[in-house]
Amino acid sequence: MKKKTIVEAASAFVQVTTHKNTNTGRAYANGLKYFIDGLTFLNLDPDVSLAEIVTEDHILPLIDIGFFKEKDVKPLLFHLSASSQHLYCSAVVAFMEYLVDEDEAQVNLVRLRRLIRRRLAPRPETNPMAARDHLEKVIAHVKNLNLIQTDNYRQRLINMRDRAFTLTLSDTGYRVSEACGLLIKDIDLENMKTRIVGKGNKVAYVRYSKRALDAILEYLNERFSLDDMFRRKVDKLRRELPVFARHDKGAGKKVLQLSTDGGRHIIDTRVVEALGPEYRDTISPHTFRHYFVTSVLRGTGNMRLAQLLARHSSATTTEIYAHMTDDELDQAHYKIFNT
């Protein structure tokens, strides 16, 4: 198969992205233009150089020192707003993910994301009410992933898994490492909970909502092509398997546990789909843990109950979330009585 040049690969990536979401494709095209322009300062000709030579090190100089366009005093990235910098760098990350998936290049994606996070200026903070609204839009989006019609069985599994994974995070208070490490045998279907060993080797129970547990069962039934017998009995071999598995090309036919980086990637992908590319990196798996605790506090006003369900060793930690809901109340009161 003929190897693509950087420009050809970028064009193919934008075309695929635009087909799925026009606005995302347009934003990513703008971001890649900055990246491709910057490559010329590395003595690369994007029209000739093959995409296979691209690595994570090609974007870092853009962030570290800022490249200058020829005869132009404005830095390539640093005259942009913090939000635009994040958006355009997200475009490059998504492009490199595409190169890896298509076997066009070898990129250390984990290192790439970490280095970008350390170098970029933080995004402007949003108020708690807006952040909660954004997260609930993501939840509404993933709830319908199982309804998407596709002839690609791997993509259907990914949709079903991502739906189950996201609803599990939002309704249980799991840390991302705990959710990714969950085994089928860990789930007590009858009592709708799981016994886990959490931080500090402390044993605790995590409760499931009906919608989260149903989503998990639908996903596993899709994986194993089982019927309702799954609810009563699963053979020993399958019980030892992870609940959330990888379905990328690299996993092949093996059932491999989803990594924490994989879990973060799921949330990142679905956030972009639900809210747009400018919201990439604004919601993480841990945001869902915040959402879980604040939902308990909003629903009950019971600090002790929230502490126990979140498995916080100290009430002081839970109080941080209470302050967040105080902010929400302040803003709601102001909106009602002062506008």
Image (tube, helix red, strand yellow):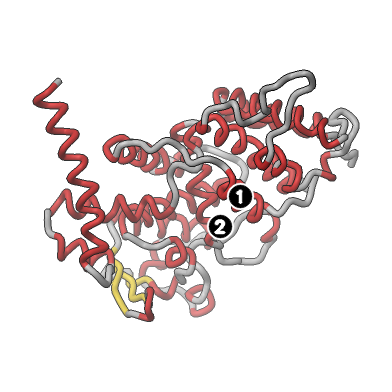
Mark 1 highlights which residue? 113
Disc 2 on helix, strand or loop?
A: helix
Mark 2 highlights which residue? 261
Q: Is 55 left or right of 64, judged from the image as shown?
A: right
Disc 1 on helix, strand or loop?
A: helix
Which amino acid type is shown beneath numbered disc 2?
Asp
Q: Residue at x 47, y 35 (%)?
A: 279
Q: Decide: few, some or many residues near mark 2? Use Cα within 10 Å; few <14, some 14-19, many ≥20.
A: some
Q: Is there a contact, CB below 8 Å, between mark 2 and mark 1?
A: yes
Tell which of 147 and 25 is nearer to you: 25
Q: Quadrant of the C terminus?
A: top left
Q: Is residue 222 above or below residue 202?
A: above
In space, the residues marked 2 and 1 are separated at their CA atoms by 10 Å
Quadrant in the rendering for residue 313 = bottom left
Quadrant in the rendering for residue 91 = top right
How far from the left and from the top, in percent, is residue 273? 49, 35
Q: Residue at x 67, y 61 (%)?
A: 251
How far from the left and from the top, in percent, is residue 219? 46, 56
How far from the left and from the top, in percent, is residue 89? 62, 37
How far from the left and from the top, in percent, is residue 244? 50, 61
Pointer 2 or 1: first along the chain: 1
Q: Nearer the viewer, mark 2 or mark 1?
A: 1
Q: Is 250 left or right of 232, judged from the image as shown?
A: right
Q: Does residue 12 appear in the picture of this structure?
A: no
